[in-house]
Amino acid sequence: MTAPAHVRIGLVATSDRASQGVYKDEGIPALELWLAGALLNPIEFERRLIPDERPVIEATLKELVDERACNLVVTTGGTGPAARDVTPEATLAVCDREMPGFGEQMRRISLEFVPTAILSRQVAGIRKATLILNLPGQPKSIRETLEGLKSPEGRIVVAGIFAAVPYCIDLIGGPYLETREEVVKAFRPKSAIRPSPRPSPK
């Protein structure tokens, strides 16, 4: 059995004030904490804290995909209707293909909590062999969006978006991602599931 594949993940927080040091960014630490806890793969993170400037966001996403060869890039912030919220436009501008189902499910999850979730413009897309996801900026919302909503008994009420991420990355030629099922169970068709590299309990 081989060990889980190495994965490189880009984390991008877009915020004028956080990038200027007015307040501390919470998005990147929340993403890193959740991903490190959800994935069994060894992860190398590429972190970028940048202002809400579309050319800067586009250049950063291109760098993370084209130069740093990230397999997954996750952004946080800049997805509302305000004039400075341009992360979705920048994301779509650099992607070869849009993946609208991710944005639809993110809003579906958020609507369980607030009616203003319909104002979110989060998108997802593929550039070359990299999946790019826009996530909300608040740590609680980040976790709910990725992990989904569970009942007190642990039953999934609304599926999180990360359940579909490993198979998507399979399909575009990326590494085989393995998750800790107590956090989030990756969904793959039976034909796409590989034997686990983890030793069986004795």
Image (cartoon, helix red, strand yellow):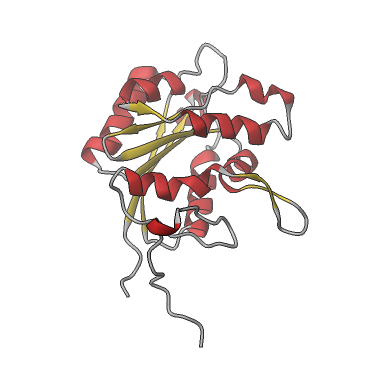
The residue at the point 51 percent across, 57 percent down is: 38
- Where's residue 82, x and y in %? 56, 14
- Left or right placement of residue 153 versus residue 190 in this view: right
Quarter of the view holding residue 111: top right
- In the image, taking residue 91 as reference, residue 114 lies left or right, namely right
Q: In which quarter of the image is the N terminus?
A: bottom left
Q: Pinpoint residue 122: horizontal percent, then vertical percent.
A: 52, 27
Residue 52 position in % (x across, y down): 44, 21
Tell me the residue at 38%/18% (across/down): 54
- Residue at the top extreme, as displayed: 83
Taking depth in this image into account, of 32 and 23 the one nearest to the observer is 32
In the displayed orientation, state which residue is furthest to the right. 152
User: Residue 129 lies in what quarter of the image?
Assistant: top left
The residue lying furthest to the left in this view is 67
Callout count: 0
Residue at figure coordinates x 31%, y 54% from the top left: 175
Q: Which residue is drawn at 38% across and 22% down?
A: 92
**Image spot of residue 107 (x, y percent):** 61, 30
Residue 134 in the image: above or below residue 118: below
Decide if residue 9 is in sight here.
no
Picture quadrant of residue 58: top left
Residue 26 appears in the rendering: yes
Q: Is residue 38 above or below residue 134?
A: below
Looking at the image, which residue sits at the far bottom? 202
